[in-house]
Amino acid sequence: MANQKKEPEPFVWASALVVLLSAILWNGCRASGQRTGATEAPPTPVMVTEVALQDVAIFSDIAAQTYARNMVEVRGRVEGYVDQWLFRPGAEVKAGQVLYVLDLRPYEAAVGQAAGNLHQSEADLEFAKNQVSLLQAQANLAAAQASLLKAQQDVERLTPLVKADAASRQDLDAAAAALTANQANVTALKANVDQAALSTRTQIGSMQAKVEALRAALRTAELNLQYGTIRAPIDGRIGDSLVPVGGLVTPSSPQALTTIVPLDPIWVRFKVTELEYASWANHGQAVPGGNFPLTLMLADQSECPVTGRIENALNQVDPKTGTLELQARFPNPKHAILPGQFGRVRMQVAERKDAILVPQKAVQQLQSMQAVYTVGPDNKVLQRAVTTGERVGTSWIVEQGLKPGDRVVVEGQLKVRPGMRVQPQPYRAPDNTPPPERQGGN
């Protein structure tokens, strides 16, 4: 009985179990605490921009097309066959540059014939001026006047002699008859001189008129010879030839030989709505939008390096479309823009004072509403519904929902939720941000 072992008492077993459970719980809590500390993430970094009031220009992009205002169709002024074709299609030509040469031989012959006729007529005129008929008539009149003077002197000398019976009456009668005859002869010769003078003047005038007509005919023949060489009427870029070498050119042909378009300046036509035109008219602008420079954007999104201005507006609104056509001029010194190209005209249509702008990518479209994330003073995220207006460059104008000083999340929206704490960092817009523009409403 002395060597018999005793069984442990219940109290001892309970104490050991408590110690074991305490150890297990302590180790579990320690492990759990270590895991909890490992999964707690720091605040999410986001890029934010602080909203401020600013004045912005509102731009509108309008579909446009280029055209050449003073395009010229090259046509022949005389009839003939093309002998030479002296230009390359698509090349730049200068005013006066030779484009075509027709067969000039018929016109050279016509010039020679007209020159010969003129020389003959000038010789006839000189002959008419130097005619002797008038001189002969004038000489005969002078001789008759001398005879009349002698007959008158004879009568005057014999009259006192007859009274004194110193001369016979018969001699006086003969002298008186001679005087009468000479008087009649002088009268007749005067009429002859007048007739010869009139005839000479008429002949000279007729020959002078003929000379002038033949000079005009020679000038016409020379012009036709010049027109046989067809030259560029203006500077510009020339198109393809529509008449080959050997083809017939006629002044009445409905088909032009080719076309030339001036490229500097280039003209652009586009249309604005009736409401936009009325807005400009209410502000007293003589030419709608004429106070603002225009930017031309081509189909490949390239931008014309120089700005243009509106020069003209048509005189009526199109009743079918409710639009008014405007015409603008753009310098094109490098001739890089051609007529017929499509593009967009960017023009300033208004200026907003004290506007609130946020980057476009900061605005989220949530079904029927727009919203942005903002960061409060405690760096917690808030969601705000906003109402946007015009789009200006890469930003929206916010009409409602934001106030100056609000910090708007621009990048990192997908990582955050309302109420989450974040680490805000300033947002910097890219250096290649395009200039402000209006591209429509919401």
Image (tube, rainbow, N blue to C red):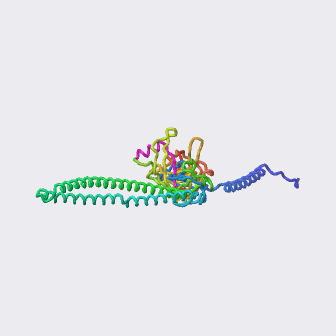
Tell me which residue sits at (27%, 58%) in the image.
144
Location of the C terminus (image quadrant) = top right
Place of residue 183 in the rendered image (x, y in percent of width and height, measured from the top left): 24, 54
**Viewer-proximal residue, 92 or 166?**
166
**Viewer-proximal residue, 99 or 199?**
199
Report the side of 222 relative to 130 (left or right).
Answer: right
Tell me the magenta residue range: 266-283
Tell me which residue sits at (43%, 60%) in the image.
123
Place of residue 341 in the rendered image (x, y in percent of width and height, measured from the top left): 57, 52
Task: Let me know if residue 274 is in the magenta part.
Answer: yes
**Viewer-proximal residue, 355 or 41?**
355
**Residue at the left extreme?**
164
Residue 431, visible in the rendered structure = no
Residue 145, visible in the rendered structure = yes
Task: Let me know if residue 366 is in the magenta part.
Answer: no
Place of residue 160 in the rendered image (x, y in percent of width and height, measured from the top left): 13, 58
Tell me which residue sits at (25%, 59%) in the image.
147
Report the side of 84 relative to 19 (left or right).
Answer: left
Place of residue 369 in the rendered image (x, y in percent of width and height, measured from the top left): 56, 42
Quarter of the image where one finds residue 240: bottom right
Quarter of the image where one finds residue 146: bottom left
The number of numbered discs placed on residues in the rendered structure image is 0
